[in-house]
Amino acid sequence: MNPDLLNILSNSNKDIDNQLLMDYLSGKLSGKEKHAVEEWMADNEFMNDAMEGLESIPDKKNVQVYVEELNRSLQKSLQKRKKRREKMRLKDSPWTYLAILVILVLCIATYYILHRFLGIGHLPDKH
């Protein structure tokens, strides 16, 4: 399997080995190991749902193929989201900077006009 791919089963948990889960699905575990996996799944609702979905696959030999396909699909989806967010950030930034610049220029101009031409803010002369 390509190491760059996200691995749903192994990355979603750090407590249990991916191969152990695949052996569980294939029915290759001893009773004690199977019981340990089932106890762990009882405490992890997401993994329990994922395992139930994988168990419903009729051909257990193709489970790894399905998992790899899901991993590729998930990675593509995540990459699309990441690119979309980056594009949105780049598009928003120039407008934000322009708005800040316009507000600063207006504030400086208002201050200058009020103080220079209208004399607001100056203390009256004492004569």
Image: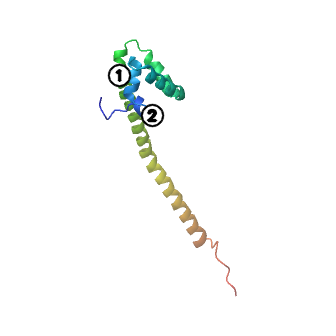
> In this figure, which residue is indicated by the disc labeled 1?
64
Q: Residue furthest top?
A: 58
Q: Secondary structure at mark 1?
A: helix
Name the residue rendered at 44%, 45% in the picture: 89
Question: Which quadrant holds the C terminus?
Answer: bottom right
The location of residue 101, given as percent across then percent down, is 49, 58
Give the number of the mark in front: 1 or 2: 2
Question: Mark 2 falls on what kind of element?
Answer: loop
Place of residue 98 in the rendered image (x, y in percent of width and height, measured from the top left): 47, 53
State left or right for residue 109 relative to residue 13. right
Specify the amino acid type for callout 1: Gln
Who's the residue at 56% across and 62% down the image? Answer: 107
Where's residue 4, x and y in %? 32, 35
Which dot marks residue 15? 2
Front residue of 16 and 29: 29
In the image, is residue 123 above or below residue 86? below
Q: CA distance from mark 1 to mark 2?
A: 20 Å
